[in-house]
Image: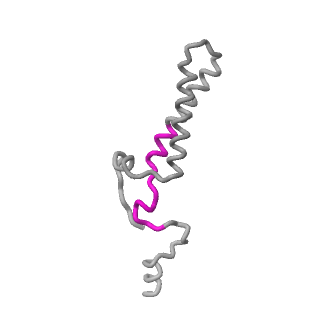
């Protein structure tokens, strides 16, 4: 397996896989809703304001973590669904 070490800045700048873009957008939406609830100009019950804070925190974490995801294709590796039957593995097994 090819090892490629990425620092945080490089990882964020790499293309994000489709699934994690969807998760990132959901996290951003949760952050927006939580921010609106937490900073509402009207008097809300303490439980709802607390829920807004948790939505804001959770959405921010979901968005940040999903932005750093990099798929195996960007690394140059094949998908794991193939069961590891790559040309290199099959050539290596015939040499034994």
Quadrant position of the C terminus in the picture: bottom left
Residue sitting nearer the eye, 19 or 4 = 19
Q: Residue at x 56, y 18 (%)?
A: 40
**Residue 44, relative to residue 91: is it above or below?**
above
Type of secondary structure dominating the magenta stretch: helix
Q: Residue at x 53, y 32 (%)?
A: 31
Residue sitting nearer the eye, 28 or 77 = 28
**Residue 16, relative to residue 38: is it above or below?**
below
Dividing the picture into quadrants, the one containing residue 5 is: bottom left
Q: How many marks?
A: 0
Q: Is residue 9 left or right of residue 1?
A: left
Q: Residue at x 47, y 81 (%)?
A: 90
Q: Position of residue 17 (x, y in %)?
A: 48, 53
Residue sitting nearer the eye, 12 or 8 = 12
Q: Position of residue 26 (x, y in %)?
A: 55, 40
Q: Position of residue 82 (x, y in %)?
A: 54, 71
**Residue 67, relative to residue 90: is it above or below?**
above
Say whether residue 75 is magenta. yes
Quadrant position of the N terminus in the picture: bottom left
Q: Residue at x 35, y 53 (%)?
A: 6
Which residue range is magenta in the image?
A: 61-78
**Residue 63, relative to residue 34: is it above or below?**
below
Q: Position of residue 38 (x, y in %)?
A: 55, 21
Q: Is residue 10 left or right of residue 31?
A: left
């Amino acid at each position: 397996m090819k090892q490629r070490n990425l620092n945080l800045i490089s990882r964020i700048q790499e293309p994000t896989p489709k699934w994690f873009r969807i998760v990132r957008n959901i996290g951003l939406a949760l952050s927006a809703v939580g921010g609106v609830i937490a900073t509402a100009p009207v008097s809300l019950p303490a439980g709802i304001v607390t829920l807004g804070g948790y939505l804001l925190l959770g959405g921010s974490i979901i968005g940040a973590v999903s932005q750093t995801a990099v798929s195996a294709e960007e690394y140059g590796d094949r998908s794991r669904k193939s069961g590891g039957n790559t040309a290199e593995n099959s050539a290596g097994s015939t040499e034994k």
